[in-house]
Image: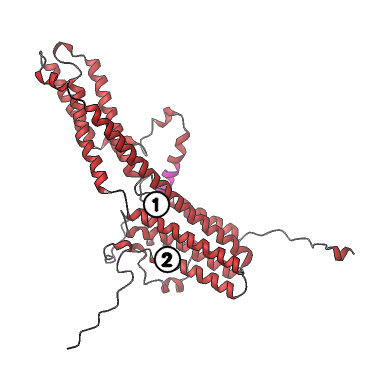
Amino acid sequence: MDTPTPAPADPDNFHENGGPPRKEVVKETRPNFKELKTIERHRREILLRTELPFWRILLFWSGTCLKEISTDLLVWLAMLIYIGIRICAHSLDYVPDSVALLEKTNIGVLGGFLSFFLVIFVNQTNGRYLEMYGFSKACSGRIQDVAGLAKTQLPPDLGKKLVRHFNAAQVSGYVGLNAIGQGSPYSKTYFFDVYNEQHQLLTPEEMKVLDHHDMDNSGLFMKEMCTWCQQDIAEARQAGYLDSYQEKFMHDRILEFRAAMDGMYDYTDQPPHFFYIHFLVLLSALYLPLFAIDTAYAAGWGEETYVGLDILQGVIVFLQCIFVVGLRELGTKMIDPYGDDLEDLSVILYVESTLEICSTIMNSKQPPKKPVVTKDAIA
């Protein structure tokens, strides 16, 4: 009995980097373009706050640690423990034996170790964040490099086609990030299709050729667009518009662009180890209640209770919560800078500025040149 031959695997049936198979087409639930623009506007506003006077910075709520701290259960647990012990201290007229025992403990050692690990975590995620920012700007820069040479060396039709394909590779690359990590808010429907309609990045015929790629769940669309760009350059070389050096220059820029995009995908696919993050969360969950207990017991009992001291020690507990939870949340926020948080990278700005610069390059015109008088003509 003959064994049936299995059907060839769909190249986009699996996510890149070993992800699960793609899902069936469902209604798009990610932010639409208007919502993405609103998020982008708030991001740019937050970036302008960094040079404001300190008193104005303190008045903001969005884009600050206060919003995250106010909803963190660990902060409220630590504060409730402190308040509960202080209420008990005021209700007693003697000093419990447990107070003397707690005086022998040293919670500060644990706090020192936790601070050390939290700073390392934030430093690591900040390094990742800046690297991924560099990748995004590198993609924009490589497109501009190619656009400049295309304007001066290629016929208008071929040059514009190359730049169109290159910009399509960038926009589709951000959409493909949805296939890995925590997903991406940039969808084909509400991101790529919008820019494609505004700037005619790809013709309907070209989109039909690429229709087999699931842009929302794969980076292969971006990969093929890079190959199309290389084919455009090879076509220009064969037609005699480019020499070997110029051809190599443009091929190198495309490969650098693809490497920068791969860097975004690699970092997104491999966040910091969950073991390390769980370790920090566990230490925080143990340390803050212990710190609250230690501080509450040290604030005085019986006749040595003072409301002013209780308030001061409560502020210290709250500041410690801000430090621990704030650093942990700061590090977590920077793990994936291509999400929809206000602290994430300004992807729309990078895309639109690249499109605007490329349009300026491709449409640039000089005034009519005066004829050059040569030495032979003078003679």
Query: Left or right: 62 with respect to 152?
Result: left
Q: Which mark is residue 149?
A: none
In the foreground, 265 or 273: 273
Secondary structure under the numbered disc 2 in the rendered image:
helix
Residue 295 located within the stretch drawn in magenta:
no
User: In 3D space, how far apart are the residues under numbered discs 1 and 2 (Cα atoms)?
Assistant: 25 Å
Whether 77 is drawn above or below 261: the answer is above
- Region of the chain picked out in magenta, as a range: 24-44
Instruction: For residue 200, say whether it is visible.
Output: no
Q: Residues within 10 Å of mark 2 (few under 14, many from 20)?
A: some
Secondary structure under the numbered disc 1 in the rendered image:
helix
Please state the horizontal and vertical placement of residue 289, each as a whole percent of the image.
19, 31
The quadrant of the image that shows the N terminus is: bottom left
Q: Which residue is mark 1?
A: 36
Q: Which picture quadrant has residue 290?
A: top left
In the foreground, 337 or 112: 112
Mark 2: which amino acid?
Lys
Please state the horizontal and vertical placement of residue 60, each as a whole percent of the image.
38, 34
Mark 1: which amino acid?
Leu
Q: Residues within 10 Å of mark 1 (few under 14, many from 20)?
A: some
Q: Earlier in the sequence, mark 1 or mark 2?
A: 1
Which one is in front in this view, the residue at disc 1 or the one at disc 2?
A: 2
Query: Left or right: 301 with respect to 36?
Result: left
Q: Which mark is residue 223?
A: 2
Q: Which picture quadrant has residue 276?
A: top left
